[in-house]
Image: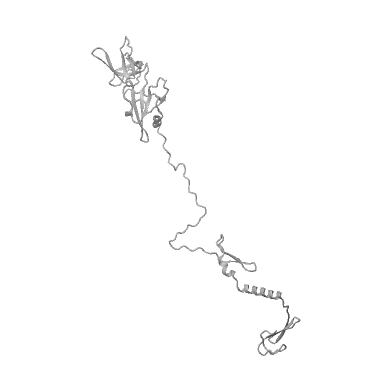
Amino acid sequence: MDYGGSPGGTGQDGADGGGTHISARADGRSTITVAGRDINSMYFISASSAALAALVGLVILLGMWQPWQETAGSGTRDRTGTAAGPERPGGSSTTTAPNREPTPAAGDDEEPEDSGSPEASPSPSPSDSPTPDPPDPVDVAFASAGVGTCLNVYDAGWGRLNRDRPAAVDCGADFAFSKVTTVTTLAANCPSGPGRWGWGHVNHDGSSTALCLDRVFAAGQCFPAKLSRQADGTIRGEGRLFSVWGCDRTQVPKGLNAIMVITAVLNGGGCPQRTDRQTLSWPVFSGAATVCAVQRPN
């Protein structure tokens, strides 16, 4: 077989041509003449030789065309910000430079640098929070005096009470001188008349409370009064019925002239008369009861 010799190649043994001359025989031996020199080689022509030649050609083609160089920059970003690409043939790997984040332009919002864990804001100490004012004890006393509460409270004799706040006592005690009948907002709402009192109080928050009191009368108690003798010889008296006065005292408030001693408290009927002294009667609680009293001897 002759493969493209130069013009002037004239036969199998001709060496004057400058081209390549291949001579093949059936025994499998061939003679290759290149540039006037003979090169002897052994070859074996078969289907497997053709397949091997094709595989060698494919390897050469892949060596010339390296597709991984074109796709190395398209790897996925890992946690450290670098791009991980495919490995080169032979087991070595290649990486590209880390992708840098764009520098924000002037005027753009920039996040502050992380200086570590954020400082915990100081929790307010108990001294920082305002301490509420303690409740006013007088407010508490008025709020605690409900209907039916008995008090050691009375008119001291000059038109004012003996205490500045209610103080609950046993209703069976000798010093239970008044009783709460109604709780309201204004003393003017309380019923008036002999033996009654409206006790008002303004609370610390500006609200108001009023206790409506009835005098608790008992035989043996004393109160001051003003007595006057009438033309017919009878005695007429004006008493401070909400007052409690010491029966052994020698003086009375200004404008009064007598100390009266209670002899009975009646729910109806007239007061029994005595032979030694005139017994006077005073209707109380809008006429619901009657207080009987005589003048204490001087």
Q: Residue furthest right?
A: 27
Residue 217 in picture, x, y percent from top left? 36, 19
Query: Could you tell me which quadrant the C terminus lies in?
Result: top left
Residue 176 in picture, x, y percent from top left? 39, 22
Q: Quadrant of residue 108?
A: bottom left
Please give left or right for residue 123 compared with residue 157 in the image.
right
Q: Quadrant of residue 167?
A: top left
Q: Residue furthest top?
A: 275
Residue 296 in picture, x, y percent from top left? 33, 14
Of residue 81 and residue 40, the one placed in the foreground of this image is 40
Of residue 146 and residue 120, the one placed in the foreground of this image is 146
Q: Is residue 178 above or below residue 204?
A: above
Q: Is residue 75 above or below residue 56?
A: above
Q: How is the image coloured?
A: one colour
Q: Quadrant of residue 220?
A: top left
Q: What number of labels is visible?
A: 0
Residue 193 in picture, x, y percent from top left? 31, 23
Query: Could you tell me which quadrant the N terminus lies in?
Result: bottom right
**Residue located 64% across and 73% down the image:** 58
Evaluate whether residue 69 shows in this view: yes
Evaluate whether residue 251 shows in this view: no
Q: Residue furthest left?
A: 231
